[in-house]
Amino acid sequence: MKPQQQPKNPCFSSGPCAKRPGWKPQVLENALLGRSHRGKPGKAKLMEVIDRTRNILGVPSDYRIGIVPASDTGAVEMAMWSLLGPRSVEALGWESFGRAWVTDIVKQLKLSNVRSVTAEYGDLPDLSQVDTNSDVVFTWNGTTSGVKVPNGDWIADAREGLTICDATSAVFAMELPWQKLDVVTYSWQKVLGGEAQHGMLILSPRAVERLESYTPSWPLPKIFQLTKNGKLIEGIFKGETINTPSLLCVEDVLDALKWAESLGGLSALLKRSLNNLEAVEKWLEQTDWIDFLANDPDTRSNTSICLKIVAPWFTDLSLEKQQKFTKDLANLLDQEGVAYDIGAYRDAPPGLRLWGGATVETSDFELLFPWLEWAYSTVKG
């Protein structure tokens, strides 16, 4: 039968993600609209974002944190175009975004000494075979596959290369071993539920040393330039952004950071996200037609929770029919106002994707499960 009670918040999108519980437009009333981001109040707001970020995440004091253009994508590209070149590269990809970085390294930067380390959706490559004396580019959490790196044990402390980590759907929801990571990138629109188009770039001292000792052979556009006359542009990491940020979005992410602090900081955010994953695990234990896309339980993402339909009748269908079924299922829940934007990513295997970050209430997950059962039965007919 059709369930009667709906999730209070139907936003399960994997980006932009649900706003924090209790969010209202009134939280933006102190935004510095019509003011310059280069004026003293604007720079103070931007620096506040950096300081609160450092405190919540526990970023080491000698790591730089900067606000950069073009969301996580801009931050990753900035790092790759500015840092790669002097060493061989290990480029890891097991889902859409990781594979995109592999493609950019090989076909856009056209580096020749590159080894692509890949795996199919649902799996990780053998990380023990990764040479961290090369520069390593990887995603901590595969947003489109629901497969995460379980830990940083495979990264050598005494490595010679740099580790460039796209952590956009991991940061604020998973433990990151900062001593293993030289570059970390993310955007506000994921676990914080912030607005899009603003990226964060975190650099270790080793990454800064590379920037100040190496000049790429290719030209860098202004929005990629992190150095001037061979020295790091320190202002970028003190609230002096490369281009104009939205001070409305800045006010919004400050609200999200203050909310995180009010909960108890990083540990509270992690617990909320893990509670969501646990709720999904309990439901799947009682459900025979659907399962995690991640094949190894240790690699299951607690943010981008990707699911595949495993019923024999479904797996016997052609790819086109599988795609139609899962699209129809997601559309039905959208029409009912129960769950928005939960279809699998366009490049991923047919299935569903539920965002389990800290801004989503576990109670909404629990209310969603009966609707998933109903929608499956309804579309199957």
Image: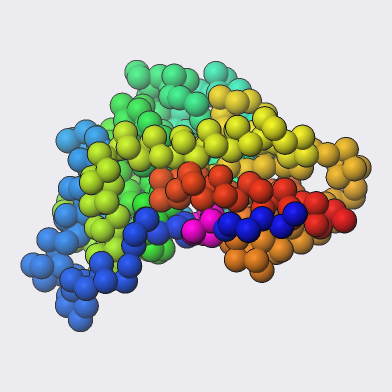
Q: Is residue 338 above or below residue 316?
A: below
Q: Residue furthest bottom?
A: 34
Is residue 6 or residue 359 the one in the foreground? Answer: 6
Q: Is residue 159 above or below residue 360?
A: above
**Could you say where residue 19 lies in the image, as x and y percent from the top left?**
40, 59
Q: Residue furthest left?
A: 40
Q: Residue at x 76, y 61 (%)?
A: 328
Indicate the quadrant containing the N terminus: top left, top right, bottom left or bottom right.
bottom right
**Could you say where residue 26 lies in the image, as x and y percent from the top left?**
26, 71
Residue interval drawn in magenta:
7-15
Residue 21 visible to the viewer: yes
Left or right of residue 216, residue 136 in this image = right
Indicate the quadrant containing the C terminus: top left, top right, bottom left or bottom right.
bottom right
- Colour mapping used in the image: rainbow
Is residue 283 or residue 152 the one in the foreground? Answer: 283
Q: Is residue 208 above or below residue 355?
A: above
Q: Residue at x 46, y 28 (%)?
A: 134
Left or right of residue 293, residue 85 in this image = left
Q: Is residue 104 above or below residue 214?
A: below
**Could you say where residue 279 lies in the image, as x and y percent from the top left?**
55, 37
Q: Residue at x 80, y 57 (%)?
A: 378
Left or right of residue 29, residue 308 in this image = right
Is residue 272 or residue 93 the one in the foreground? Answer: 272
Q: Residue at x 71, y 57 (%)?
A: 2
**Could you say where residue 215 lies in the image, as x and y percent from the top left?**
33, 47
Q: Magenta stretch: residue 288 in it? A: no
- Picture quadrant of residue 343: bottom right
Residue 236 visible to the viewer: no
Is residue 290 or residue 34 the one in the foreground? Answer: 290
Q: Magenta stretch: residue 13 in it? A: yes
- The secondary structure making up most of the magenta span is loop
